[in-house]
Image: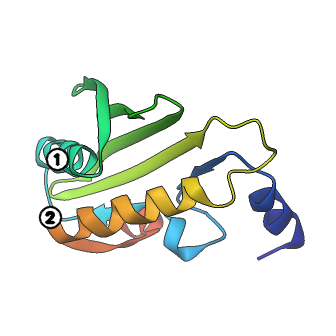
Amino acid sequence: MALKDTFGQLFSKRTETGEQHALNELKTRYYKTTKDKALEAAGKVIENQQWTVKRVEAERGEIVATSVNGKNLFIVTVITVKPFRTAVDVSCSIDTVLPSDFGQSRKAILAFYKALDQNLPYIGSGLGDELS
């Protein structure tokens, strides 16, 4: 990982997953399921982790949730790439007066993915080039 990425993570209040992320654990995750089942499973995981679902946009494949205190925002995006090949990306931001969230947003995403892996058949991470 580049020095720029390391400093960016140290002084960040938000973490996002992505296809080309520098950290393997934060790359887009792929599951062998449909978009609707992935959205349902993601919603259950969010509720089990004490987040409050604010909005579900099934046609866009998006779930927006906040923490109990309302200071944390959690957005899950689900996209079907091929039949029974569904990508799940997550963005988490923490509202704090400090210049960093000290890895809280990253930990929230990793906990979400770990729980989702137990509910859906996991295929792999960062597979966009292989599946398209």
Q: Residues within 10 Å of mark 2 (few under 14, many from 20)?
A: some
Residue 120 percent location from the top left of the image: 16, 64
Q: Is residue 50 above or below residue 23?
A: above
Q: Residue at x 88, y 72 (%)?
A: 3
> Which of the 4 image quarters holds residue 52?
top left
Residue 62 percent location from the top left of the image: 33, 33
Which color mode does the image show?
A: rainbow
Marks 2, 1: nearer the viewer: 1
Residue contact at pointers 2 and 1, CB within 8 angstroms: yes
Which residue occupies the foreground of this view, 98 or 105?
A: 98
Q: Secondary structure at mark 1?
A: helix
Which residue occupies the foreground of this view, 4 or 31?
A: 4
Residue on which disc 2 sits: 119
Residue on which disc 1 sits: 44
Q: Is residue 38 above or below residue 64?
A: below
Outermost residue toward the front in this view = 69
Q: Residue at x 32, y 63 (%)?
A: 30
Q: Secondary structure at mark 2?
A: helix
Quadrant placement of the N terminus: bottom right
Judge from the rendering whether residue 87 lies leftward or rightward of residue 37; answer left or right: right
Specify which label sits upstream in the sequence, 2 or 1.
1
Q: Residue at x 26, y 26 (%)?
A: 56
Marks 2 and 1, how far apart in space? Answer: 9 Å
Quadrant placement of the C terminus: bottom left
Name the amino acid type tagged 2: Asn
